[in-house]
C-alpha cells in the first residue's frame, strides 16, 4: 500500500484536534479519538478507511503516536491511540501550516526521494525555515 502524504497529515492534525484533556478529580487525563471519530472528522472524511488505518500504523511504527490496531475475528476493528509522542508533536509543528507543508513536500521531491515518514521527519527536523 502506498502512503498518501495528504492523508497522513490529515490524520495527525485530526488526532491533535480531537484530543481532549479532562479533569479527573485532582489529576488530568488525555482522551484520544477512536477510529470512527477520525473517519468522520472533516479533515479525514475524504480518505478511505484503509488509507487512514495505514497512516495510523505508519505513525505508530515510526513512534510518532503511541497505540496500535485492535483486532476482532482477524480484522482491524479499531485503532487505540494513547499519545502523540514528543517527536510527533515536533512534526506537527512543522506540518500544521499549509505553506510550510508544501515547502517540505517540495524539498523531499527535489531531493529525488519518495515520500515516507522517515524522509518527512528527516527533512522537517533538519530545516529551521519551514
Image (spheres, rainbow, N blue to C red):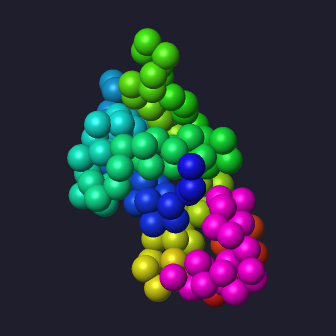
In the image, residue 1 sits, relative to residue 101, either above or below, namely: above
Image vertical order of residue 35 relative to residue 77, above or below: below
Q: Position of residue 42 (x, y in %)?
A: 24, 58
Q: Residue at x 43, y 12 (%)?
A: 73
Q: Quadrant of residue 117?
A: bottom right
Magenta span includes 87: no
Q: Residue at x 40, y 28 (%)?
A: 78
Q: Which residues are magenta?
A: 102-120
Residue 108 sits above or below residue 92 on the image: below
Q: Residue at x 47, y 35 (%)?
A: 81
Q: Residue furthest front?
A: 1
**Residue 69, position in %: x, y?**
51, 28
Number of numbered discs: 0
**Foreground of the two, 28 or 70:** 70
Residue 71 in view of the camera: yes
Q: Is residue 65 visible?
A: no
Principal secondary structure, stretch drawn in magenta: helix
Q: In the rendering, at what x and y percent does residue 47 appear?
A: 34, 55
Q: x and y percent of residue 15 in the render?
A: 41, 49
Q: Nearer the viewer, residue 86 or 13?
A: 13
Residue most extreme to the top = 73
- 118 inside magenta stretch: yes
**What residue appears at the point 56 percent right and 72 percent down from the top-left corner?**
94
Left or right of 67? Residue 41 is: left
Q: In which quadrant will I find the C terminus?
A: bottom right
Amino acid at each position: 500500500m502506498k502512503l498518501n502524504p495528504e492523508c497522513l497529515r490529515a490524520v495527525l492534525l485530526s488526532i491533535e484536534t480531537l484530543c481532549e484533556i479532562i479533569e479527573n478529580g485532582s489529576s488530568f487525563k488525555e482522551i484520544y479519538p477512536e477510529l470512527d471519530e477520525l473517519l468522520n472528522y472533516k479533515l479525514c472524511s475524504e480518505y478511505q478507511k484503509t488509507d487512514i488505518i495505514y497512516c495510523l500504523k505508519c505513525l505508530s511504527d515510526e513512534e510518532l503516536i503511541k497505540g496500535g490496531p485492535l483486532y476482532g475475528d482477524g480484522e482491524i476493528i479499531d485503532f487505540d491511540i494513547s499519545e502523540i509522542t514528543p517527536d510527533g508533536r515536533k512534526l506537527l509543528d512543522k506540518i500544521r501550516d499549509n505553506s510550510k507543508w508544501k515547502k517540505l513536500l517540495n524539498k523531499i521531491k527535489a531531493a529525488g526521494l519518495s515520500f515516507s515518514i522517515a524522509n518527512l521527519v528527516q527533512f522537517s527536523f533538519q530545516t529551521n525555515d519551514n
